[in-house]
Amino acid sequence: MPPGQSDKFIHFFLYLILFQLWYLAGIKNVFRLSLYLFFFSFFIEILQELLPVNRSFSLLDMIANLAGIYTGYIISRINKHI
């Protein structure tokens, strides 16, 4: 794996796990949960840009976050029909 790309997998899997944990905790409206996690992800990325830390906004991080959220959404929809 190229250097720096493992970070994107971490983003993907953390948001996938976060989605599944919230879903299992009782938030069954998966569309609303997806929106909450999207805005949380966006908020965190904006904070990284604004705060005086050695971090910056990354569109690729946002894409990885959204991919994790979407995968969680798909898994929850499949599990609902099983």
Image: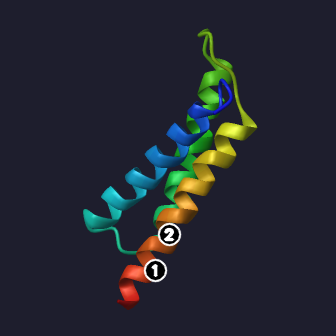
Q: Residue at x 34, y 65 (%)?
A: 23
Q: Residue at x 61, y 9 (%)?
A: 52
Q: Secondary structure at mark 2?
A: helix
Amino acid beneath label 1: Arg
Residue 59, quarter of the rendered image: top right
Badge 1, how many Cα within 10 Å: few under 14, some, many 20+? few
Identity of the residue furthest to the right in this view: 59
For the residues labelled 1 and 2, say whether their Cβ atoms are less than 8 Å apart. Answer: yes
Q: Secondary structure at mark 1?
A: helix
Amino acid beneath label 2: Tyr
Q: Quadrant of the C terminus?
A: bottom left
Left or right, residue 18 beside residue 74: left
Q: Which residue is tagged 1?
A: 77
Task: State how far apart marks 1 and 2 are (Cα).
Answer: 6 Å
Residue 44 locus on image (x, y percent):
56, 34
Residue 2 versus residue 39 in the image, above or below: above
Left or right, residue 50 beside residue 11: right
Q: Residue at x 61, y 16 (%)?
A: 51
Residue 70 locus on image (x, y percent):
57, 64
Left or right, residue 75 beside residue 8: left
Q: Which residue is tagged 2?
A: 73
Identity of the residue furthest to the front in this view: 1
Residue 2, quarter of the rendered image: top right
Q: Number of marks in the image?
A: 2
> Which numbered dot is residue 19?
none
Residue 36 locus on image (x, y percent):
50, 56
Residue 53 versus residue 38 in the image, above or below: above
Residue 9 locus on image (x, y percent):
55, 41
